[in-house]
Image (spheres, rainbow, N blue to C red):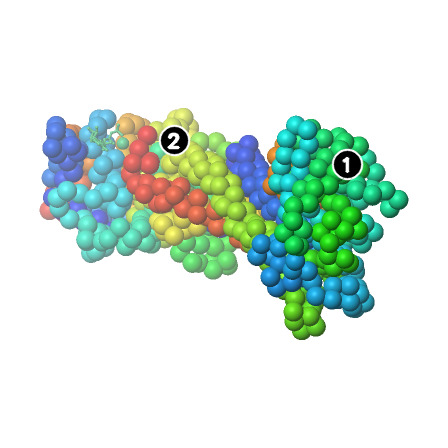
Amino acid sequence: MIFIMAWRNIWRNKMRSLVIILSIAIGLFAGIAVLALYKGMMKSRVRAVIDAEVGHLQLHDRHFKKDFEPAFVITGGVAVLKSITAMAGVKSAAPRSITNGMLATTTGSAGVQINGIVPHLEYATSQLKNKIIEGKPFDTAKQNEVMIGKKLATKMKVKTRSKLVLTFTDTSGNIVSAAFKVAAIYQSDNAPLDERNVYVTMTDLNALLSIGNAFHEIAVLLNNDNEVKNMYQQLQNKFPVCQVESWQEISPETDLLVKTTDQYSYIIMVIIMFALAFGIINTMLMAILERTREIGMMMALGTSKIKIFNLVLLETFFLTLAGTPAGLLVGWLLTGYYTKHGLDLSGMGRDMMSSFGFNTMIYPEFPWDKLTGILLIVFCTAILSCLFPAIKALQLKPVDALRN
Amino acid sequence: MNTVIDAHNISKVYNPTTIPVYAVNNVHLHLQKGEFTALVGPSGSGKTTLLNMIGGLDRPDEGNIFINGIDITKLSANELISFRLQNIGFVFQSFNLIPVLTAKENVEFIMQLQKASKQQREERVKTLFAQIGLQDKLNERPSRLSGGQQQRVAVARALASRPQFVLADEPTANLDTKSAFNLLDIMAKLNMEENITFLFSTHDQRVIDRARRVITLVDGRIVQDTAEVSTQHEEAAAVKT
Ligand SMILES: Nc1ncnc2c1ncn2[C@@H]1O[C@H](COP(=O)(O)OP(=O)(O)OP(=O)(O)O)[C@@H](O)[C@H]1O
Ligand SMILES: [Mg+2]
């Protein structure tokens, strides 16, 4: 009978019940939306790190990364590259010769990392060609071309076809300077990286560094993300003189980001749930105040406190039950839509997003893995927040409640 | 005859620290099984307070109340709740019925609290609704019943638990004359035919006239009790024959 009463009580004040049902639905939806957005953002961030920045794995000479000393080239680099490219599971591999130096124009200068690349390998491994927003990719017929990031170009007031001078030390410690012409300006989702990295052809850079056909870095892109651990082992065994690193090691901040997102999203969930809890406490309290006499009368007749408590609890439970499918459905439909079409966050400013390394186009993903967690949180919030009104109901004294 | 209510020397004081109000002042009250008693008195004379204490809804500051030999002033709050359920039927002035339950469900509700079986409930509901003459209103919600009909359902509900006695605080106060008489007829009939004990408070002279015993309260004290008079009459009559 308490069951029936709880159910019918919900329909007594339809407006109020609707408010609770809606807030539960909205709370649930908001939770799903946040998690879906985070999941999408993290996925795309990880994708960007792997596909456009570092690749799955990188190899260097064991001493190279300490000071980026150009003398520490990968021993037998060409052979190593060839053998890696031939390994099963490897999609592509790109060699890079790297040195730190200075970029100077007539108006100023900036410290940069100069990457000497083999264009077609680089395009396949880090999408460099796709990042070009102005100008043309490297022309094999031309010499001393450079590609620089948009952020740096803006800062240095450089346009395509501008001339600039790169200065660095070669393997023997001599200072080398050379004039380069800007072939293209590129832009990735990661502005800080764009500001630091400039690209020239390996042919040009190696000649200036006088390291022949040697290089310092091999970036490896695999067919499958799950193969990273396995390949890491294989490469380590195969090339013991090299330092092998996974993308998690090279970009630990991304790894950390992915790992802390869960915590962040739960914190946001908790904040949303607080709002929901206040809504429920308020509304249920009102529902109880309105029924003071009725509850007093029920107690006078001999209804136990547990029954009264259950009544309030059940009402909240029913409302939650009604709100849940609505929230789930809207969450599912909306994430489904945006998973397909993408959610354009350029309203937040492309610069802002890219300074954190995020694309403005987010493809949210329904957080199936967290669904039970979210549902549990919503139900617990609903039940917990009706405890206070329920206890208030129990504290009613029939004599006072019944007195006109 | 067996005593159902035996209240000894009970008092209730409101605001004992500021301006004390003796809502009930040193009252003795004995009620036998099958009595049909009206509690009368001006407004504020303590009728509700006295009924609440006898009904186990409120505690006296002094004195003891025995219901069928059990001192309810010694029961804990939770014991009182189940004591009320098993022993006392209540009819209030208003807000008697649970609005979301039908007339029948309102009556069944009490029996369900007592864990009566479905069959027991059905049978009892049938009998009771026949007695109050509302067989055709079983499935109506209270909002669709007249005030008088609601009070009749309340009487049925009060009886559903087969209590020791029924307490009714101004059950006719919100009713028109016809409904009031109708309710009273039903109560009187149940009293006569089923020996149900009623104790009800009222302002209403028409109701008072129907009572077989009238207890008058003024300022929390019993100033008149017709039982004593009638016992004297009976004794006198007995002596004569
Ligand atoms: N909760 C309370 N606090 C303070 N005083 C109270 C309280 N309840 C009742 N009283 C006082 O106790 C006295 C008796 O009240 P009670 O309600 O028992 O009278 P009554 O005979 O039922 O009156 P009525 O005919 O108006 O219903 C009154 O003076 C009332 O003001
Ligand atoms: Mg009163």
In the orientation shown, which residue stands out farthest toward the bottom? A237
Which label was assigned to residue B180?
2
Image coordinates of residue A240 in percent, x first then y, are 65, 71
Question: Which of the four quarters of the rendered structure image does ligand 1 lie in?
Answer: top left
The amino acid type, in three-letter code, at marker 1 is Val
Q: Is mark 2 on a helix, strand or loop?
A: helix
The residue positioned 73% from the left and 56% from the top of the image is A211
Image coordinates of residue A304 in percent, x first then y, are 36, 51
Image coordinates of residue B69 in percent, x first then y, are 20, 56
The residue positioned 22% from the left and 49% from the top of the image is B5
Few, some or many C-alpha atoms within 10 Å of disc 2 (few <14, some 14-19, many ≥20)? Answer: many
For disc 2, the chain is B
Return the residue at label 1.
A182
The amino acid type, in three-letter code, at marker 2 is Ala
Few, some or many C-alpha atoms within 10 Å of disc 1 (few <14, some 14-19, many ≥20)? Answer: many
The residue positioned 26% from the left and 46% from the top of the image is B56
Q: Do the residues labelled 2 and 1 touch (CB within 8 Å)?
A: no
The CA span between labels 2 and 1 is: 103 Å
**Which is in the foreground here, disc 2 or disc 1?**
1
For disc 1, the chain is A
The residue positioned 24% from the left and 42% from the top of the image is B58
Q: What element carries label 1?
A: strand
Observer-nearest of A71 and A315 = A71
Q: Can residue B45 be seen in this view?
A: yes
Q: Is residue B214 visible?
A: no
- The answer to whether the beta carbon of the residue marked 1 is less than 8 Å from any atom of ligand 1 is no
Observer-nearest of A381 and A295 = A381
